[in-house]
Image (tube, grey):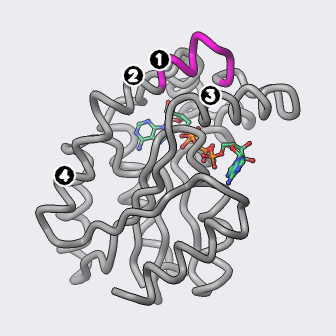
């Protein structure tokens, strides 16, 4: 099972990625989590990514693509993987196709979790109270939503053209959304 999860910030990608990874016994690979771990560890990659993340911009493609290319060479992805938050623009999607072709594989499905701007803003502001993430402030959330609409939304059209896209409603209880995702993937 080789999957990609896309959706606006706050749609529930990270939340659902952990559950799907469990269900299918594959690793969930979140570019956001890898960047945050590097920021916390004060690595060179972390220092490079930090400024972009804290203002809600995408980290430059050459940095992100190299990081994912390296991650997809690890042994644990042999039986499959779930990419959460990558690709985030059409150039990254083309790059991913190339990486997979080099490894002699391809994606099985791309799942888009949908949720409207009001709902995701409410969720992220709530998370800010709990986790205090630097990019969960109202201004930065607005910027992240704008980046999503401009750069990431076209990624879904790219995969729709390849016949890989599955759309799932992300509004509702977390368990309910997980059930919808598993049903939608089973139906494919
Ligand atoms: P991410 O870490 O991917 O952050 P995100 O889009 O906000 O999603 P996240 O997974 O954290 O939140 P979720 O929707 O699960 O990216 C952060 C930054 O990293 C980017 O802005 C960018 O700078 C950089 N980056 C990452 N990938 C990149 C790439 N490919 N290229 C360039 N830059 C990249 O959950 C949000 C909240 O909603 C949680 O609190 C959760 O508890 C809650 N929630 C989830 N499901 C819910 C439900 N059904 N009901 C109610 N609440 C729910």
Q: Identify the disc placed on residue 143.
A: 1
* The C terminus lies in quadrant: bottom left
112 up-or-down from 9: above or below: below
Answer yes or no: do the residues labelled 1 and 3 have beta carbons within 8 Å? no
Which residue is label 4 attached to?
A: 157
Which residue is label 3 attached to?
A: 121
Q: Nearer the viewer, residue 48 or 30?
A: 30
Percent across and percent down for residue 140 are 57, 16
Q: Tell me which image quadrant ligand 1 sits in.
A: top right
Which residue is label 2 attached to?
A: 146
**Mark 3 or mark 4, earlier in chain:** 3
Magenta region includes residue 67: no
State the separation of the CA atoms marked 3 and 4.
24 Å
Answer yes or no: do the residues labelled 2 and 1 have beta carbons within 8 Å? yes
Question: Which residue lies at the image location 54% right of the left edge and 25% below the top edge?
Answer: 53
Q: What element carries label 3?
A: helix
Q: Residues within 10 Å of mark 3 (few under 14, many from 20)?
A: many
Percent across and percent down for residue 173 are 72, 59
**Mark 3 or mark 2, earlier in chain:** 3
On whether ligand 1 comes within 8 Å of the CB at mark 4, the answer is no
């Amino acid at each position: 099972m080789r999957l990609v999860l896309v959706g606006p910030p706050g749609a529930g990608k990270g939340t659902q990625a952990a559950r799907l990874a469990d269900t299918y016994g594959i690793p969930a690979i979140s570019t956001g989590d890898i960047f945050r771990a590097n920021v916390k560890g004060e690595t060179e990659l972390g220092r490079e990514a930090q400024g972009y993340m804290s203002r809600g911009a995408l980290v430059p493609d050459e940095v992100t693509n190299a990081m994912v290319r390296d991650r997809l060479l690890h042994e644990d992805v042999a039986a499959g993987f779930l990419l959460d938050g990558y690709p985030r623009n059409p150039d990254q999607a083309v790059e991913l196709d190339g990486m997979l072709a080099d490894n002699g594989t391809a994606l099985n499905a791309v799942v888009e979790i949908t949720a409207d701007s009001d709902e995701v803003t409410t969720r992220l502001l709530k998370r800010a109270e709990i986790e205090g993430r630097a990019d969960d402030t109202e201004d930065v959330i607005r910027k992240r939503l704008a980046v999503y609409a401009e750069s990431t939304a076209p990624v879904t059209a790219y995969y729709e053209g390849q016949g890989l896209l599955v759309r799932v409603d992300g509004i509702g209880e977390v368990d309910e959304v997980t059930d919808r995702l598993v049903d939608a993937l089973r139906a494919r």
